[in-house]
């Protein structure tokens, strides 16, 4: 159990205190309990990198992994690779780290005029041999780009300076590794130096006394990256992310603030923080991480946000399992794990409430629990920084899971290719199927009247019974529209209920589901309903309403656009009227009617 | 004889860095008496002392501090008190 608990505090690299690290390691080594995993790591290096050992041990211990670390002889990379009796062949390591520093690669007398071509050829040769002669994963470092250029500011316009050559070398290393993704990876020391800053990374004192160029902060960062690699190699990556909703996916509480009161947008803080956090969640989804919801809420409220909030990037379709109820979260998460048939140790749970976090930690110690940080701006990086979901490679299976999401992103990219909106819309092959409601459709129609808020002129909520009665009535017509485009079918997406009053036709209800808006279907649909009904009922005048609510502001001008005139206003509720002979037919040829 | 806080701190740093117990760290402690005191452990000793006493050794001092008494002397140069 001690081992499992250890999973929870792999809080990587802040400012590490070496003494604490050493003390922790010695304490763990003195314990008799064994580790769940072990790993055999071998360093080939051209500089003193032994200072990494305490950090590497520390992070691996905290992940319940016992490392066996061997350092090759100082500046002996080539000899050890060519020597068939070398420890890298006899010890059969799982990971070989090839750690190179620039200073020991450069010619002795002057680096002026040094070219990286030969060095990259040499490094490639090492890696090829290691790939052939071992079964290990090969991790190669990039090189810290020198801070000063030996040719001063002319480095900017001279394509042969040391900085230019080092950057080129690093880029070639990255490219080379990308070409061999199953066995190779980069420990991007150059990028880490950028993160920490050059002076905070480089140790000139120990460089001259001990050929040890890196400060402990940089060594700690390299160790943490290497630990992430080991964790991924050992299959310790998390597979499932369980999300709380209120104040985690968005700011505010849906049950109290309503969908319009939530803080979630791509413009300003704190809404943008939650928006960016949702982006990181989607990125994980694209990599195949399973997303689940666990929230104390009314289920409908949560789906309303996911289905209709314009800035909720997380949609219902991304969610594999959920428990939205008032039960305790530990029970709910356990149920989700059972439902998905996944071990709790592959779960990460995030919540803003310290009480909920504490409960889950206590009840389900295998679950990795993250709390929404008090410094809210730290939220968007929380899922990535510790590498919980790292995998060495993306599998085909990972990518397949994202198919549905890609359909939507295709629609979006298509949109960029066209300047004229109608031209774009005609490329979508939009097709609609309109008919008067049939019995099988009544449940969905009633549901739409109950759920739809944004494109809904009267927001009248009807039961299935009431819809059935309308269908039977000679003075009512109920129309539904099914919408599809070249990317997929969206099913029943709009409802019109018309009422007859002698020669007047009244639009009792007109609503459209948000996900089909922007395709001008909302114009084609009502147009068809009018034409059909004008014939059947001999309508002379149309009457329509707009009852404003907090949520339907976007359609306030709709009837005016359609040529209707306001005849009556009371408490903001507007009544409109239009004579049939004045009605112009919509010209929407790109929408095909089935 | 009472042992000062800083003396305790020094012993603790050395015991931790050299992976031994506090009893092993005495006035005569040096690479001759402590088996683990090699060049790599010496680097950790430098870093850990700097952390513990919030100081920075010069390059010369990193080489000078080759036994317990010398460490105390150099620390005193950094105004660390051992009374």
Image: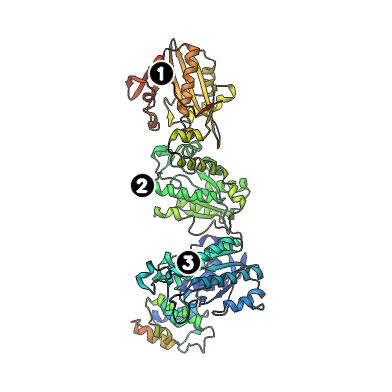
Q: Nearer the viewer, residue A72 or A350?
A: A72
Where, quadrant-wise, is the C terminus of chain A in this rendering?
Answer: top right
Q: Residue A374 lies in what quarter of the image?
A: bottom left
Q: Residue at x 47, y 89 (%)?
A: B28
Q: Chain of mark 1?
A: A
Q: Earlier in the sequence, mark 3 or mark 2?
A: 3
In three-dimensional space, the C-alpha distance between marks 3 and 2, rounded to whole angstroms, equals 39 Å
Circle on res. A268: 2
Per the image, label 1 sits on a secondary structure element best described as: loop
* Residue A499 in the image, given as x and y percentages of width and height: 46, 16
Q: Are marks 1 and 3 on the same chain?
A: yes
Sequence-wise first label, 1 or 3 = 3
Marks 1 & 3, CB-CB < 8 Å contact: no
Work out which quarter of the rendered image holds the N terminus of chain A and state it: bottom right
N-terminal-most mark, 2 or 1: 2
Residue A325 place in picture, x, y as percent = 52, 40
In the picture, measured across the screen, residue A445 lies left or right of residue A311, that is right
Q: How is the image coloured?
A: rainbow
Where does label 1 land, which residue? A583
Chain letter for mark 2:
A
Q: Which mark identifies residue A168?
A: 3
Query: In the rendered image, is residue A101 in sight?
Result: yes
Using the rendered image of the protein, determine whether residue A62 is visible from the camera's viewpoint.
no
Residue A395 or B47: which is nearer the viewer?
A395
> Which tag is nearer the camera, tag 2 or tag 1?
1
Q: Residue at x 48, y 84 (%)?
A: B25
């Amino acid at each position: 159990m001690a081992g499992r608990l250890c999973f929870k505090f792999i809080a990587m690299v802040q400012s590490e205190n070496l003494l604490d690290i050493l003390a922790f390691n010695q304490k763990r080594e003195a314990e008799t309990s064994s580790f769940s995993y072990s790993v055999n790591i071998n360093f080939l290096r051209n500089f003193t990198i032994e200072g990494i050992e305490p950090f590497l041990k520390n992070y691996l211990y905290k992940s319940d992994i016992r490392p066996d670390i061997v350092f090759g002889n100082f500046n002996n990379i080539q000899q050890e690779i060519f020597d068939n009796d070398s420890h890298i062949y006899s010890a059969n390591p799982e990971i070989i780290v090839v750690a190179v520093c620039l200073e020991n690669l450069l010619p002795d007398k002057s680096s002026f005029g040094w070219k990286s071509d030969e060095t990259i050829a040499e490094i490639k040769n090492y890696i090829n041999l290691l790939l052939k002669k071992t079964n290990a994963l090969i991790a190669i470092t990039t090189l810290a780009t020198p801070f000063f250029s030996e040719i001063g500011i002319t480095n900017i316009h001279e394509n042969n300076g040391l900085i230019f050559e080092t950057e080129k070398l690093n880029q070639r290393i990255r490219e080379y590794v990308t070409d061999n993704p199953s066995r190779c990876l980069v420990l991007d020391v150059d990028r880490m130096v950028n993160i920490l800053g050059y002076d905070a990374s480089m140790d000139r004192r120990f460089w001259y006394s001990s050929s040890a160029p890196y400060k402990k902060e940089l060594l700690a960062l390299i160790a943490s990256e290497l630990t992430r690699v080991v964790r991924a190699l050992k299959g310790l990556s998390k597979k499932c992310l369980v999300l709380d909703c209120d104040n985690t996916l968005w700011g505010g509480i849906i049950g109290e603030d309503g969908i319009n009161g939530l803080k979630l947008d791509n413009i300003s803080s704190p809404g943008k923080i939650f928006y960016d956090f949702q982006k990181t969640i989607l990125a994980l989804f694209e990599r195949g991480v399973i997303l689940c919801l666990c929230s104390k809420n009314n289920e409908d409220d949560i789906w309303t946000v996911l289905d209709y909030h314009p800035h909720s990037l997380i949609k219902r379709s991304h969610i594999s399992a959920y428990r939205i109820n008032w039960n305790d979260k530990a029970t709910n998460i356990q149920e989700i794990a059972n439902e998905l048939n996944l071990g709790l140790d592959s779960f990460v749970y995030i919540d803003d409430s310290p009480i909920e976090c504490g409960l889950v930690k206590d009840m389900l110690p295998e679950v990795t629990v993250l709390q929404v940080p008090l410094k809210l701006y730290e939220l968007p990086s929380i899922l990535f920084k510790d590498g919980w979901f790292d995998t060495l490679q993306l599998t085909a299976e990972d990518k397949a899971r994202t198919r549905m999401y890609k359909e939507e992103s295709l629609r979006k990219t298509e949109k960029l290719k066209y300047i004229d909106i109608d031209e774009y819309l005609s490329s979508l092959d939009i097709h609609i199927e309109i008919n008067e409601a049939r019995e099988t459709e009544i449940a969905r129609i009633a549901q739409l009247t109950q759920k739809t808020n944004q494109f809904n002129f009267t927001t009248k909520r009807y039961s299935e019974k009431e819809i059935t009665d309308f269908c039977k009535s000679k003075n009512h017509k109920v129309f539904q529209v099914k919408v599809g485009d070249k990317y997929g079918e969206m099913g029943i997406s709009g409802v019109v209920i018309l009422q007859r009053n002698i020669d007047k036709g009244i639009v009792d209800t007109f609503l459209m589901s948000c996900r089909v808006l922007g395709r001008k279907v909302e114009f084609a649909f009502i147009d068809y309903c009018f034409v059909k009904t004008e014939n059947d009922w001999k309508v002379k005048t149309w009457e329509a309403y707009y009852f404003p609510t907090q949520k339907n502001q976007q359609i306030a001008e709709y009837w005016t656009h359609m040529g209707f005139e306001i005849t009556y206003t009371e408490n903001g509720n507007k009544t409109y009227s239009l004579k049939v002979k004045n009605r112009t037919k919509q010209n929407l040829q790109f929408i095909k009617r089935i | 004889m009472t042992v000062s806080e800083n003396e305790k701190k020094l012993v603790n740093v050395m015991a931790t860095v050299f992976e031994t117990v506090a009893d092993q760290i005495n006035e005569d402690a040096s690479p001759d008496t402590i088996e683990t005191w090699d060049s790599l452990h010496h680097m950790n000793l430098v870093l850990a002392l700097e952390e513990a006493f919030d100081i920075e050794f010069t390059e010369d001092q990193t080489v000078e501090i080759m036994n317990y008494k010398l460490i105390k002397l150099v620390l005193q140069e950094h105004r660390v008190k051992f009374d």
